Amino acid sequence: MKRFEGRRVLITGAGSGIGQATVHRILAEGGIVVAVDVSEAGLAATHQRAEADGTADQLSTVVVDISDEASVRAGVGGAITGLGGLDVLVNAAGILRSAHTEQTTLEFWNRMLAVNLTGTFLVTREALPALLATGRGVVVNFSSTSASFAHPYMAAYAATKGGIQSFTHAIAAEYAKQGLRAVSVAPGSIASGMTADPGLPADADMSWFVKLQPALGQGFAGPETVAGVIAMLASDDGAFVTGTEIRIDGGTHA
């Protein structure tokens, strides 16, 4: 399939995990991609994989700290200018940390907000003029099953993901008449760098997490599973999908 032939796509969190998998899925479908991440080493790995796949000529990379307004304006704004516009934005960047809520410091809380929620806002705001100019722009944001279901020790993370979900609904309604679609994916039970070590407290009650097993019985899925759903939503195959969330968890929360 070449659903993204000639389409310009910017993907944050592109140096690892689901963001990286999405880069390679979109490249394979013909997209012109700017990969954005705070990690230069991560972006180098993404580019190396593209070289191996023969898609490196469609890829450029930019180091950006999405929690920093100046960095977003310079990096994301410059990337969009270089592309000559933008058709799709995928806000995959985020961090996951855990703590007992009564032990959560303001610094911890603010850092989660700054990267996950404020970062999504800053990148989206920078991209909106170019997306709206196309008349059919798409924003795919990252919520999480933790926004709607109980995941202990992750109150700060869940709050940011719930905020992203609400933010997505709001911009979907605000810009629908200008042709913009905005959707969220809510991954769960996905094996990626972020979930490999969520930093649970040493005394965490692990019986809670025994419940987090996919109903499909095949164990946790890989990042490519989510990338495939994103590709559908961001392409014309998802043309009538906006202002909603797509849960990707193998029935963990069925």
Image (cartoon, grey):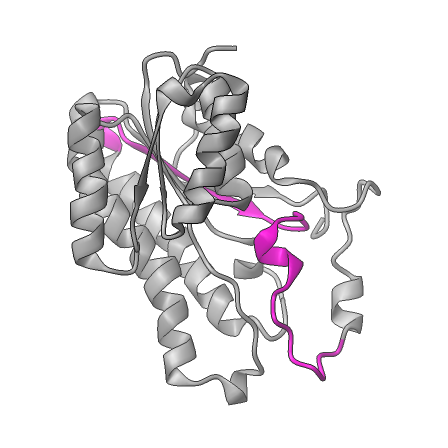
Q: Position of residue 247 (x, y in %)?
A: 58, 43
Q: Residue at x 20, y 22 (%)?
A: 134
Left/right of residue 212 with respect to residue 193 in the rendered view: right
Q: Position of residue 225 (x, y in %)?
A: 63, 34
Note whether residue 230 is visible: no
In which quarter of the view is residue 181 placed?
A: top left
Q: Residue at x 37, y 18 (%)?
A: 57
Question: In the figure, 144 relative to 3: above or below?
Answer: below
Left/right of residue 204 with respect to residue 130 in the rendered view: right
The question of residue 197 being in magenta is answered with yes
Q: Position of residue 86 (x, y in %)?
A: 24, 27
In which quarter of the view is residue 201 placed?
A: bottom right
Most foreground residue, 88 or 162: 88
Most foreground residue, 84 or 179: 84
Q: Position of residue 142 (x, y in %)?
A: 45, 47
Question: In the figure, 138 relative to 45: above or below?
Answer: above
Q: Which residues are magenta?
A: 176-205
